[in-house]
Amino acid sequence: MVEKFIVRIAASVRRWTDDLLGVIYPHTCEICGEALLEGEKVICLNCLAKIPRKNFHGQFDSSIAMKFAGMAGVRKIASFFVYNRQGGTAAIIKKAKYANQPQIAYELARIFASELQTGDFFDGIDGIIPIPMHWFKQALRGYNQCEEIAHGISDVTGLPVLDNLITVRPHKTQTRKSADERKSLDSSIFKVIAPEELAGKHVLVVDDVITTGSTISAACNAIIQAQPLATVSILSLAKAH
Ligand SMILES: [Zn+2]
């Protein structure tokens, strides 16, 4: 696929220019700015302990569950922390998305997956599907932060990252949309490639932030409509109130 090739080239260019410009990822905490200690990545342990958590690891989040009412096949939902301006979590997500710092998404996903790994959240899951970005937008950015999250989880769990879901039309990020625009997102913006590969599979769909839940539910609906024998679970780094 030509689009995939362009996205891969753009990702390589991003890494080359980082190398050429001597971009060294900061060894300071992305929330408080203090120097990171040995073993700490992206955020310090002090900030990690203080970030406002969503405490429903491995359980169904009833506040989002309402949005999936009647949607067969959704099993589990987990979000790492609350998306808010006060706790610095909105800033950290924005850096991961817009500031050429995909390693933030990757490392936060590793931290969250390590915590979830101590319970049974990943039991029965066969693969990870990141919310795709339109290929043109991804080529411009040089990465898709949701893919970074997926690879961070994969690094901890060993689960494969699947590329069965693509975006057929560009869609605006949820955090930059009006309430009306958010409601109107439908599953036709996503397309499942090779749906037969997902038959009988339980996939974990991952996103950076769940705001209204419309992006993630459109993606889950697209998967289940294309392959009714698939089941899905959901993971996001952040969840808005
Ligand atoms: Zn800190």
Image (cartoon, rainbow, N blue to C red):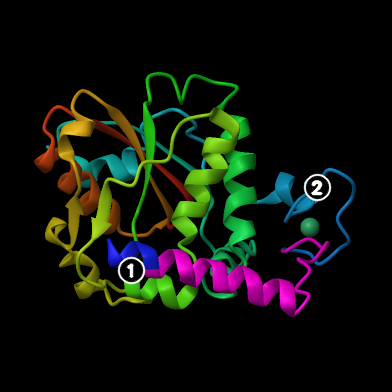
Which mark sits nearer the N-terminus, 1 or 2?
2
Q: In this rendering, would 69 be left or right of 124?
A: left
Q: Is residue 50 above or below residue 116?
A: below
Q: In this view, does 44 lie above or below 97?
A: above
Mark 1 or mark 2, which is nearer to you? 1
Total numbered badges shown on the rendered structure: 2
Q: Main secondary structure of the magenta part?
A: helix
Q: Which of 89 and 123 is in front in this view?
A: 123
Where on the picture, by quarter, is residue 109?
Answer: top right
Residue 16 forms part of the magenta stretch: yes
Task: Give the secondary structure at mark 1.
Answer: helix
Which contiguous range is marked in magenta?
A: 6-30
Residue 123 appears at what percent x and percent y?
A: 43, 19
Q: In the rendered structure, find residue 183 and report the number of the disc placed on it.
A: none
Q: In this rendering, would 72 be left or right of 176?
A: left
Residue 139 appears at what percent x and percent y?
A: 42, 73
- Residue type at numbered disc 2: Glu
Which quadrant of the figure shows ligand 1? bottom right
Residue 221 forms part of the magenta stretch: no
Q: How many other residues sit within 10 Å of disc 1, few (<14), some (14-19) or many (≥20)?
A: many
Instruction: Give the distance between the C-alpha atoms of the residues marked 1 and 2, in whole angstroms.
Output: 33 Å
Identify residue for label 2.
40
Circles 1 and 2 in contact, beta carbons < 8 Å: no
Residue placed at 26% from the left, 26% from the top? 201
Identify residue for label 1.
135
Q: Is residue 208 above or below residue 168?
A: above
Residue 80 appears at what percent x and percent y?
A: 53, 44
Please indicate, yes or no, whether residue 175 appears anywhere in the rendered image: no
Residue placed at 45% from the left, 28% from the top? 58
Please state, as top left, top right, bottom left or bottom right, where the C terminus lies in the image. bottom left
